[in-house]
Image (cartoon, rainbow, N blue to C red):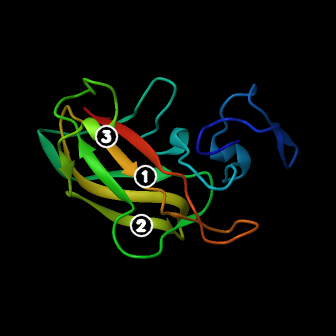
Amino acid sequence: MDSGAGDWTGDVTVGTKTLNPTSGDYPETGLGGGAVGLVPYGAHFFESDPPYTSSGPGAIDVPGTLITDARIAITHYGIIGVTGTGKPYIVYEAPGSHCTSGCSAELFSIKTSEWSTISIGAAGSPRDMVLEGTARDGKHYHVDVNGTLDCSDVFGDPGTDSKPYGFIFNTN
């Protein structure tokens, strides 16, 4: 699967299981704890927390008006890491609970620095980028990842950058 676009390039056999575009989505537990995707890796939205499924973006619970320790985990199609300085992402907060003029971060006026990196490719979750920050009740968030995460443990040229992507979640 082209892990950046979600397009299949052909059947893939993992053990005795053949994966193809007509077989549906595969949770990591069905693949022995991993995922299949071409380098450069993109996000595996279905496996992320909150998950982004065919029903749309997932939500995190915000009791009251805001929480300062909201946590999300964006899972990728392969093991990731990061080198260099600076955050490989920007978090945007929409003024309301939905995108009003299309879901594009360029339309957001509120870029928030209230999010920090907990881990990227840590030993316990080598495919995850875990972020923590302030989330407000009834809001819509975009995390724009700039494509500078490292795709680790790959065949061929090491140090390949990940695909840039956007991850969307809501609060309730």
Which picture quadrant has residue 80? bottom right
Q: Residues within 10 Å of mark 2 (few under 14, many from 20)?
A: some
In screen coordinates, is 2 left or right of 110? right
| Whether residue 73 is situated above or below residue 26 in the rendered picture | below
Q: Secondary structure at mark 3?
A: helix
Q: Which residue is mark 1?
A: 73
Classify residue 87 by image quadrant.
bottom left
* Residue at 46% in and 65% down: 120
Reading the image, the residue beneath label 3 is 105
Residue 26 location, x and y as percent?
Answer: 67, 38
From the viewer's perspective, tell me whether residue 22 is left or right of residue 34: right
Q: Which quadrant of the figure has residue 78? A: bottom right
Nearer to us: label 3 or label 1: 3
Quadrant that contains the C terminus: top left
Tell me which numbered mark, 3 or 1, is placed earlier along the sequence. 1
Q: Can residue 114 be seen at all in this image of the molecule? A: yes
- Front residue of 126/85: it is 85
* Dot 1 amino acid type: Ala
> Mark 2 — residue?
119
Q: Amino acid at mark 2?
A: Ser
